[in-house]
């Protein structure tokens, strides 16, 4: 991957992306506040291991932060995340790297694939792709 880049203008446009382009690395702390928010929606968490759904939420949070500022009107078409079996615990720091994996134009729509990888203590916890229909 190349050095993390910034958009050429006020927002990221389709032309700013290139396969292999590194975006921002974002750290999400899996702290008590995040766990409390999770528990408000899904119920309390028992045990030392945090639920994978909380990791999905953290990955999405990091994905959104990795490519700002974005134009209004993008469409989140799909996402796929794969877990490695490494478990997360309270107060772990999930470090998420994001990069442009691919871009293509299909039927006059601009598609960008953002690849993410989340690690805790240097161990890969999960990785996957977010497929976006890019507005500009």
Image (tube, rainbow, N blue to C red):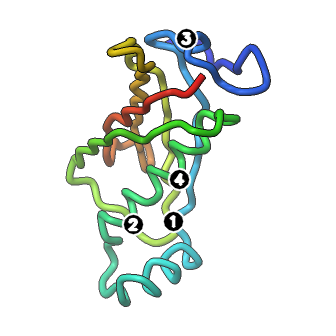
Q: Which residue is mark 3?
A: 2
Give the mark nearest the N terminus, 3 or 4.
3
Q: CA distance from mark 1 to mark 4?
A: 12 Å
Q: Which residue is mark 2?
A: 54
Give 74 or 52, whichever is nearer the viewer. 74
Q: CA distance from mark 1 to mark 2?
A: 8 Å
Give the mark nearest the N terminus, 1 or 4.
1
Q: Which residue is mark 1?
A: 30
The percent coordinates of residue 86 (x first, y second) are 27, 54
Which secondary structure lies at badge 4? helix
Give the mark nearest the N terminus, 1 or 2.
1
Q: Which residue is mark 4?
A: 61
Give the mark nearest the N terminus, 3 or 1.
3
**Image quarter of residue 102:** top left
Q: CA distance from mark 3 to mark 4?
A: 23 Å
Rendered-image quadrant of the C terminus: top right
The residue lying at 74 percent from left, 14 percent from top is 8
The residue lying at 39 percent from left, 25 percent from top is 113
Q: Nearer the viewer, mark 1 or mark 4?
A: 4
The percent coordinates of residue 62 (x first, y second) are 53, 47
Give 47 or 132, whichever is nearer the viewer. 132
Give the mark nearest the N terminus, 4 or 2.
2
């Amino acid at each position: 991957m190349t050095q993390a880049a910034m958009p050429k203008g006020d927002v990221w446009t389709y032309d700013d992306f290139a396969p292999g382009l590194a975006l921002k690395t974002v750290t999400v702390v899996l702290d008590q506040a995040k766990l409390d928010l999770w528990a408000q929606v899904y119920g309390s968490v028992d045990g030392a291991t945090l639920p994978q759904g909380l990791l999905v939420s953290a990955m999405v949070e990091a994905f959104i932060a990795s490519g700002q500022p974005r134009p209004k009107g993008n469409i989140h078409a799909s996402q796929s995340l794969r877990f490695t079996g490494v478990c997360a615990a309270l107060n772990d720091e999930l470090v998420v790297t994001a990069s442009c994996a691919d871009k293509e134009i299909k039927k006059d729509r601009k598609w960008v694939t953002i690849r993410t990888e989340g690690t805790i203590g240097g161990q890969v916890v999960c990785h996957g792709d977010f497929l976006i229909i890019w507005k500009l």
